[in-house]
Image (tube, rainbow, N blue to C red):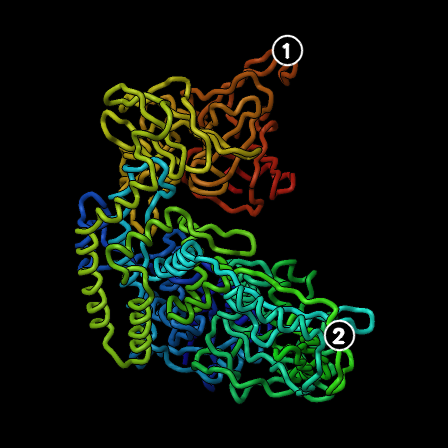
Amino acid sequence: MATPTVLMVAEKPSIALSIASVLSRGQMYTRRGSTEVHEFGGMFLGFHAQFKVTSVIGHIFSVDFPVKYQDWTATDPLDLFQAPVIKNESNPKAHICRHLNQEARGCGHLVLWLDCDREGENICFEVIESSGFSVNEARKRVYRARFSSVTEKDILKAMDNLVEPNRYEALAVDARQEIDLKVGVAFTRFQTSYFQGKYGNLDSRVISYGPCQTPTLGFCVQRYFQINTFKPEKFWTLHPYIMEKGYELQLEWGRNKLFDKDVTVMFEKRVSEDGILEVTEISEKQESKSRPSGLNTVNLLKVASSALGFGPQMAMQLAERLYTQGFISYPRTESTAYPSSFDFRGTLSAVANNPTWGNYVQGLLENGYHKPRSGTDVGDHPPITPMLSATEDMLGRDPWKLYQYVCQHFIGTVSPDCKYLRKKVEFSMGGETFYCTGQHVTVKGFTSIMPWLAVNEKNLPRFAKGEKIEVSKMELYEGSTSPPDYLTESDLISHMEKNGIGTDASIPVHINNISERNYVQVQAGRKLVPTTLGITLIRGYQLIDPDLFLPDIRSFIEQQITLIAKGQVDHFRVVQHVLQQFMQKYSYFVKKIENMDALFEAQFSSLTDSGRSLSKCGKCLRYMKYISSQPPRLYCGTCEEVYYLPQKGTIKLYKELTCPLDNFELLLFSIPGPEGRSYPLCPYCYSNPPFEGIETLIRADKMGGSGKLGKGAGMPCFLCPHPTCPHSLVAQGVCACPECSGTLVLDPVSAPKWRLHCNMCNCLVFLPEGAHRISTTQERCPECDSTIIEVDFNKKTTPLEDGATLHIGCILCDELLHSLVEMKHGRVNMRRMGSRGRGRGARRGSFRVRGRGNGKKVDPKMSFRDF
């Protein structure tokens, strides 16, 4: 009987490696594929089996509309609410779907090691579909491994307790994806189409809407409104001072503060006439500050922002890295309660040898640790805890700061409570009560390991009841109430959690989105200050339909999605009900858009009043205006057309040359910096690519699809396949890129540091420096099919014999030129490129590599394609 084969699939390559290393005890064979495959033999469910462990890289599929709905101009956004959705492979170049299908051939069992949350459950069914397995098939069984960390103990425990994947949780993710796609794209396309092209200083390429993103922005703008509508109010209070043992002690007034100055002055006169304080009461009370409950994702993100200086998205990335490296448990959890079976002693022992807190942990292990406070158990994962000991040298500065907090928090949960003695002394003077308080810590408890939560000690002088003390000074203090501050990221996370906006996994994404869209700016103290655009959008929704930004609808949707995950409601009915609601709101929004547009007119300048004259339009031959604010664009007032340009660089005329296709004047786009690049582009071709199937540098925003700017928008000259244009890929392309499927193109204005750059990636190739002129020719190398270049060397520095300056050759096959060429950002991993692009068949010479290659020579026998 043949030995059965078991295919195991993890969510990331690093987790697959950890699983295989544990189950094989390090005795495995690893081969490359789309992701690595680790093979070994072992026992599975009581019988001997061959194992193959591989991984995906996150979601295999993404939800999108069919091609017929991608064109913004041909599709009414209202139709998107009822449009079908399809799942496309998220990263086609990775070939994950094909990889899984190939590896699953001949396998009798599939074990899914995806992250144990709803997203992971959804990926489980993507893997099942890609691999050709079926959950209900008797001969080819599918199993689900549930684990919270990648330690040996957790992996072995998961292997011994395999379960079935949860279809309901996967459907809950499908529901959210479809709702967010249809609602977000419909509103985004309409808003962007309506407002872009009308205002010159509108600082956004895409004016997006999101069912979670927009309520997130709403919290920030509502706080802005509170600040700007706040009216300060004056108040007054009394502060008597007494001198005790050489220092002055301020007393607090029992009435706290009054908002009537005359009444406060009356009390001041009364107590000042008395002038003597009498001690009327002395009380002492033993109080405690409770140790924290378990750490969940939301609290980790809040602390990372408020105390560690990390934005939520960066904090989540660091946490995921620590998890995949095995240093902490799974970082996405809503639970703050530990399960009854949690091994506290084992977790403490894992960090007991740490040089930073090892002595404290040893004390807990020897003297006894405390049971953590009861928290909330939502049935997903235990709280975030350390799994392995680490140091800053092992992790690096930022990961260490997050890891250190996770460790300190966990140690704090099993430490004693902090206990302190609170003393209050009350005084009477002129019929008014005053008091002072002091605190003395008796047991530091968990604050020893979490010192930022320590109780501030304050010692009071000794007083005796009935004692009379003369007032040294009486202060009538005048103050004003102050407005609330802008929301910090930590505050915003609290609001989102309270109102059910987003999940522990998506909260960082929504906060990052409103920043990336230029709706808010992150300022000192990680405060989120709304921009004019963000404020105007929320004010517009407020005028038309406040439900579009208030959290109530999204909170309801999340509740329904949770019911789907529990199998209590039908996935299809929930999706249709929600989409029907938003379709009605969308129709009303479109009818009332003039209300929002009036706000935009008051805040932003029209295109006709913006920009400066730069280049001629190829249609009317009038000068167009260049508008440099985001998104950069050209505006022809005569034709009333807008042409979008690439971002994050400078634009100027390119030698007054014109495009042979449409007669528009060419522009030169330059990216600043020592490794920057320059390339010409035609503004018309860039916004309206004249050729099908062109790979692009800049695509329309993912949320809005790829229709508004034309499918494949963003075509510079170095992607253009026009056969006669002197600026096109055909004319300026030299050879295949050694790092991707792109082509190395001559940078026409890079003198005196001449270079080639890839039209698809960041690879740079430096040509002979100091040459007077370098240009491409129409000749092709007979050996490798690369373009022959012509180099006119400087007379003083020419490497040619007899002082000659002109040299013609191939940079791959000509020994002289090849010796003068260097590559930056090269990978010295001998990765073959295949037979794509120019340079096929090149076999001579080596490439000197600098940057990531550290200047190492490569074997001269390797071809240019072998990098």
Residue 694 at x, y percent in the picture:
32, 38
**Tag 2 secondary structure:** strand
Instruction: Indicate whether 659 appears above or below 735.
Output: above
The residue furthest front is: 273
Q: Are dots 1 and 2 in contact, CB under 8 Å?
A: no
| Residue depicted at 41% across the width and 77% down the height | 144
Instruction: Indicate whether 678 appears above or below 593.
Output: above
| Residue depicted at 20% across the width and 69% down the height | 577
Task: Report the amino acid beneath label 2.
Answer: Glu
Residue 565 at x, y percent in the picture:
32, 76
Numbered mark located on residue 803 in the image: 1
**Tag 1 secondary structure:** helix
Q: CA distance from mark 1 to mark 2?
A: 101 Å
Q: Nearer the viewer, mark 1 or mark 2?
A: 2
The residue furthest right is: 245
* Number of other residues with Cα within 10 Å of mark 2, as a class: few under 14, some 14 to 19, many 20 or more: some
Residue position for label 2? 470
Residue 325 at x, y percent in the picture:
58, 66
User: Could you tell whether 430 is left or right of 554 in the image?
Assistant: right
In the rendered image, is residue 452 in sight? yes
User: Could you tell whether 183 is left or right of 807 in the image?
Assistant: left
Instruction: Indicate whether 146 appears above or below 548.
Output: below
Q: The N terminus is located in which quarter?
A: bottom left
Label 1 vs 2, first from the N-terminus = 2
* Number of other residues with Cα within 10 Å of mark 1, as a class: few under 14, some 14 to 19, many 20 or more: few
Q: Nearer the viewer, residue 89 or 256?
A: 256
- Figure disc tally: 2
Task: Report the amino acid beneath label 1.
Answer: Gly
Residue 120 at x, y percent in the picture:
41, 70
In the rendered image, is residue 31 in sight? no
